[in-house]
Image: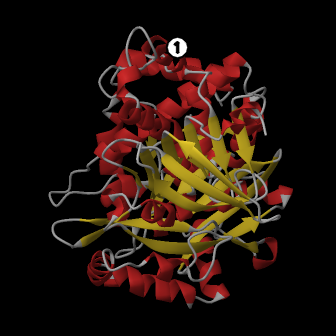
Amino acid sequence: MPSVSSLCPDVVLIGAGIMSSTLAALLRELDPSLSMMMFETLADCGQESSYAWNNAGTGHAGNCELNYTPQRADGSIDISKALAINTEFDLSRQLWAHWVREGRIADPASFVQPCPHISLVWGAENVAFLKARYEAMVAHHCFADMEYTSDPAVIAQWAPLVMAGRDTSQPVAATRIRGGTDVNFGALTHALTASLKTDRNIAIHYNHRVTGLTRTTDGRWRVTATDTESGYTTTVLARFVFIGAGGNALPLLQASGIPEAAHYAGFPVSGLWLRCMDPAITGQHHAKVYGKAAVGSPPMSVPHLDTRVIDGKSCLLFGPYAGFSTKFLKSGSWTDYFRSLTPRNIIPALTAGKDNLGLLDYLVRQVLQTNEARFKALQDFYPTARPEDWTKVVAGQRVQIIRPDTGLHGTLRFGTELVKSADRSLMAVLGASPGASIAASVALQVIQQVFPGRLTEADWLPRLRQVFPAYGIDLTKDAQACALLRENTAHVLKITG
């Protein structure tokens, strides 16, 4: 083992996906003397939700996801969530650009590509919604580059496949932001962990499942990990533990025994994509095109036709088609969900289920959906699509959060959330989308909440401002800083499009 073989690392990170690798890399920027250990159950990093084929790689920035901009009862559009996600993605861009400048990432094209973000709707009511959404968003400087059209010919120029063969008598509209991205979070995770491996103060252990997580009398955490190949057990004592294990974060958080985790539950959701690899087709579509979920459908059901660039090759993904699985990870066990239920979270789980019977009905219908019905959904986006050009791909597993509300009532949450112990010695990231896209924001929140004493001019603040040039600036209010930042990061990341 390397120099951290003292078995008393400053930081232990559980999971080797985009969340843990981002936090570890940022901590190294701020204090290279910190010793860290990372434990990953699988044989490599970024193999679950971070893996390229397991997510849409949208680089969620609130540009095109219509579920981030709900319509109020009076008809106005609430853009607050889209704005928050939009500027959180700016943090990711700043961090990635810093790593490119520092040489920690050799080529930004290895993980991020320019890709327009488009919202597409049809039908008079949906067109009216999109127009109202556009007017609300374009009035804010964060979305000032958004374009709108209800002209089928213009939409055909933006995304030819979605208009070919479409019924021209039906109203249609679209918005576009050219400066969107496609992100391969698996490739980014590999780049970060490869850089981390060169540091003698950091040890990454693959094929190691964390089987014990207990407090010691001096306030540290005893973390026990078992080598899944040899059966050998390693035990370390850490001052801080970060659980960034995707769907498995909830069981690990429960194992910690911290009171803050007691009533949390999880709702696992699986999914499918349709994938096309034919260059003759993929060459005609270069955009991420998001539609509007059907009335009564949950946020996870928002359909989209996405350009993906993976290993230098373009492909198209359509979906997701939701389903239900009791696994918490794609590589997990069918018993994961049942083992996560405890006397303290069973009531929140049941009340959340009662409040979301429509979601349960939707998932059942999705599971029972025929291949013909799935393909019909694709043809709503791409009218001339042919079944022989598409194959079915299993998406990554997601665990939505059921959070305790008033009393023991549970609320199903769609998003990403941090849960920490009262003494800030342990923190876990739960939930799903926007997930990977805001990994830098999550890492920064961890640092601000866990290490507040080090955020001084004599310690970490000057370095934070180097890493995040807009640190401390509210980009939703400072239009000039926002524009300059985006111009600079686009140049460094080569995503000017």
- Identify the residue at the far front of this view: 217
Q: Nearer the viewer, residue 247 or 52?
A: 247
Place of residue 236 in the rendered image (x, y in percent of width and height, measured from the top left): 61, 47
User: Dot 1 lies on which element?
Assistant: helix
The quarter of the rendered structure image containing the N terminus is top right
Position of residue 75 in the picture relative to residue 391 (left or right): left
Vertical placement of 112 versus 255: above or below?
Answer: above
Q: Quadrant of residue 232?
A: bottom right
Figure label count: 1
Alpha-carbon neighbours of circle 1 within 10 Å: few (<14), some, or many (≥20)?
few
Q: Quadrant of residue 181?
A: top right
Q: What residue appears at the point 54 percent right and 64 percent down from the top-left corner? A: 247
Vertical placement of 374 versus 105: above or below?
Answer: below
What is the basis of the colouring in this image? Answer: secondary structure
Q: Nearer the viewer, residue 437 or 465?
A: 465
Position of residue 70 in the picture relative to residue 22 (left or right): left
Place of residue 384 in the rendered image (x, y in percent of width and height, measured from the top left): 69, 70
Position of residue 390 in the picture relative to residue 140 (left or right): right
Vertical placement of 350 versus 137: above or below?
Answer: below
Place of residue 381 in the rendered image (x, y in percent of width and height, measured from the top left): 58, 66
The quarter of the rendered structure image containing the C terminus is top right
Q: Nearer the viewer, residue 321 or 280?
A: 321
Q: What residue appears at the point 45 percent right and 13 percent down from the top-left corner? A: 459
The residue beneath circle 1 is 466
Q: What residue appears at the point 54 percent right and 81 percent down from the top-left corner? A: 326
Tell me if I can see residue 176 in this picture.
no
Position of residue 441 in the picture relative to residue 315 (left or right): left
Place of residue 24 in the rendered image (x, y in percent of width and height, measured from the top left): 60, 35
Q: Mark 1 belongs to which amino acid?
A: Gln
Q: What residue appears at the point 56 percent right and 61 percent down from the top-left corner? A: 212
Tell me if I can see residue 20 in this picture.
yes
